[in-house]
Amino acid sequence: MGLLTLAFTGLITAQAAEDKKPQTSVQLSFDRPLDASMAPFVAASSGGLFGKEGFDVSFNFASGSPDAIARVASGSSEFALVDINELVRFHGKADAPPIKAVFVLFNQAPYAIVARKSRGIRTLADVEGKTLGTAESDLSFHLWPALARQNGIKPANVKVYRMSAAVREPILSAGQVDAVAGFSYLSAVNLRDRGVPASDLAVLRYADYGCEAYGFAIIVNPAFAATRPDTVKAFVRAVIGGIHLAIKEPERAADEVVARMDGGQRDLELERLRTVIADNILTTEAKRNGIGGIDPARFERAIDQIGEDFKFHKRPSAADIFDDSFLPPVRVRLIN
């Protein structure tokens, strides 16, 4: 066997050893059933990015952000994707474990009022005197008081119709309410799927009316982060790679999500993914500063807005909620 052959064989063997390096098994909890908003994680898994970083990642699904946070607190899940505003409320309670977010996926929260123009609603001010449907424990409705105050709306002049999340879109499409509070990438997209024409929908995003909130973020178990910081950094790198894949090839990313769903519709999930990328991930701030991080001053203002509808035992600071030490350099996080 020649020297060149030996060298090549050695290179292949080394590469194979690298590819077969020991895998760290971790659990990633989502706070709701799978949809295309989780496409970056599915892409990182199916594209082998988690594997290349040394992970064997299993997904599980919680019954909301509080449940997902509890799983990370207990250590049954090392990571979770949760609404960062729920994490703020979690920290506002006495003796809350020091769980922190390490990567912000949604630079803008997806909160929105989704209304029918045919019911006389085109701007947020038009909601006064109308009936607003909201699901029990709807995350968007927690910030409604702050949004109303900012925009000179008297909440007492808006009739609130409480319902379950399962009937939110059917009730609006049937005309039983004039608008609903929810997520733009869920309610607005689901309504178009129910036959409500896009021309009749007014999607009033909280972010366009002064809401400073960030959205979904990755949180990590504190003990895991303290003992395995490089592993957390590797997980974040894999997620960033998954975001790149989802943005570059949204059709493929949507297909991969639908393949894991029970009864998922490809066109619906592709529209959902494109909405999330445009409205929540690739915002002006994210394009300027890179994905994954926060503007501390903005986040402090967002915490103040949360405090208008939540009584903190002790008001947390931005540093109590978000740890940027696991993020790669900005140049790695820029997407143009």
Image (cartoon, helix red, strand yellow):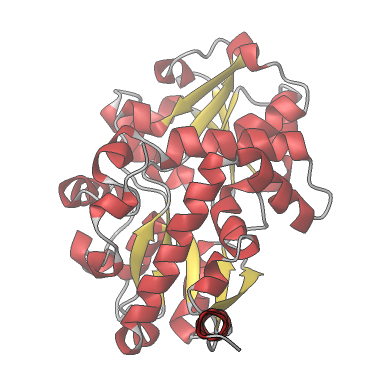
User: For this rendering, which residue is in front, 2 or 257?
Assistant: 2
Vertical placement of 279 versus 28: above or below? above
Q: Residue at x 47, y 56 (%)?
A: 241
Quadrant where the image shows the C terminus = top left
Q: In screen coordinates, is 287 left or right of 48?
A: left
Q: Which residue extends farthest right?
A: 263
Vertical placement of 23 versus 45: above or below? below
Q: Residue at x 18, y 52 (%)?
A: 296
On the image, the x and y values in percent for residue 21 come to 53, 86
Q: Residue at x 52, y 14 (%)?
A: 121
Do we see residue 317 in this rendering? Answer: no
User: For this rendering, which residue is in front, 220 or 130?
Assistant: 220
Do we see residue 210 in this rendering? Answer: yes
On the image, the x and y values in percent for residue 220 come to 41, 74
On the image, the x and y values in percent for residue 253 come to 64, 47
Residue 147's image quarter? top left
On the image, the x and y values in percent for residue 31 come to 57, 62
Count of labels shown? Answer: 0
User: For this rendering, which residue is in front, 49 or 80?
Assistant: 49
Q: Which residue extends farthest front?
A: 2
Q: Residue at x 35, y 24 (%)?
A: 153
Q: In screen coordinates, is 73 left or right of 23?
A: left
Q: In screen coordinates, is 257 left or right of 28?
A: right
Quadrant where the image shows the N terminus = bottom right
